[in-house]
Amino acid sequence: MRSFIICCATALAFTACNTGPEITSPLSGTRDEPFASHVIVTDVSCGDVLTTDVRLEEDLTCAGDALTVGADGIRINLNGHVISGNATGVGITLRQRSDVVIHGGTVRNFLTGIFVSQSTGVTIKDNGFTLNREAVFLIGSSGNVVKANRAWANTSRGIMLRPTTSGIVSTNNMVVGNTLIDNPSGILVFGQSGNTLKGNTISGSTVGGFDLTGGGGSGNEIKGNLVSGSAAGIKFGTGWTGNFIIDNTFATNTCGLAGPGASNTYKDNVFASNVTNICP
């Protein structure tokens, strides 16, 4: 445990603890999630299209894509198990789906852990992700929740939000309470507006804890996060204006904030023991 002196008008104490999950340890399953339908399927195989509630009873090792969500309103309880890939495909795919919950397991060694395309009302919670290119990828998807997950040692990104190539946006998403360790970009937002990124703990990002790129976005709220030991707490690309950076702590980073981020609103942020607090 280390104490930092907070760089603000009132001297306070802040304690940082960089702890992460063991890479080979799946998370415990969440067993009290209410199920939407009367049928719960427990016999699941690689390549299955899921159309009713699911509870895994064993680990899966898959080549290419593992599971696809083929119905709205279902609950997928990974039940403490691991879905492993061969560094290709997607762990769990959702396309044009709504009201789906995925929780309670670990997805590892895919291109994308969970891929959410043009979907809404999806909740991804209490999962672990490692050795994927990115853990969770929302594309053209709005009104979703990604919370209380752990993503560590993925090769490019922890969580990514971006539009489709045809311009369908990802907005009004909640990325809350996740722990993101040793991913080059912790949370990457590619030119999107109106999302809430709150209460996340990010460390060891070689690009940035928050990597804001893709031509700019506005109206995003980045609030109550802790970013430490990274190249930048927030790395701004061009065009990022009118966002709200509130009550975050940026500690022991090379840069607290990097890039053209002046045209945003800042309030009650803490900068502690960074090499440089503000980098051009």
Image (cartoon, rainbow, N blue to C red):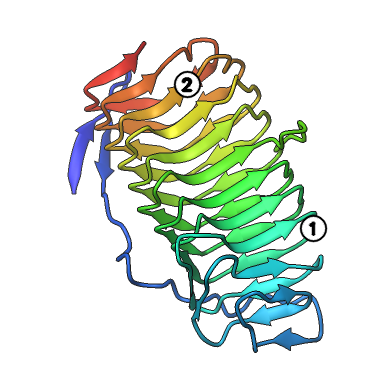
What residue would you read off at disc 1?
Answer: 98
Secondary structure under badge 1?
A: loop
Q: How many marks?
A: 2
Residue 49 placed where, x, y %?
73, 73
Would you place residue 213 above or below residue 38 in this image?
Answer: above
Would you place residue 110 above or below residue 162 in this image?
Answer: below
Evaluate whether residue 268 shows in this view.
no
Residue 109 placed where, x, y %?
44, 62
Whichever of labels 1 and 2 marks the residue nearer the N terminus, that label is: 1
Residue 77 placed where, x, y %?
61, 75
What residue would you read off at disc 2?
Answer: 236
Task: Tell me which amino acid carries mark 2.
Answer: Phe
Q: What residue is rendered at 41% in x and 72% in y?
A: 26
Would you place residue 142 above or below residue 107 in this image?
Answer: above
Q: CA distance from mark 1 to mark 2?
A: 32 Å
Q: Quadrant of residue 191?
A: top right
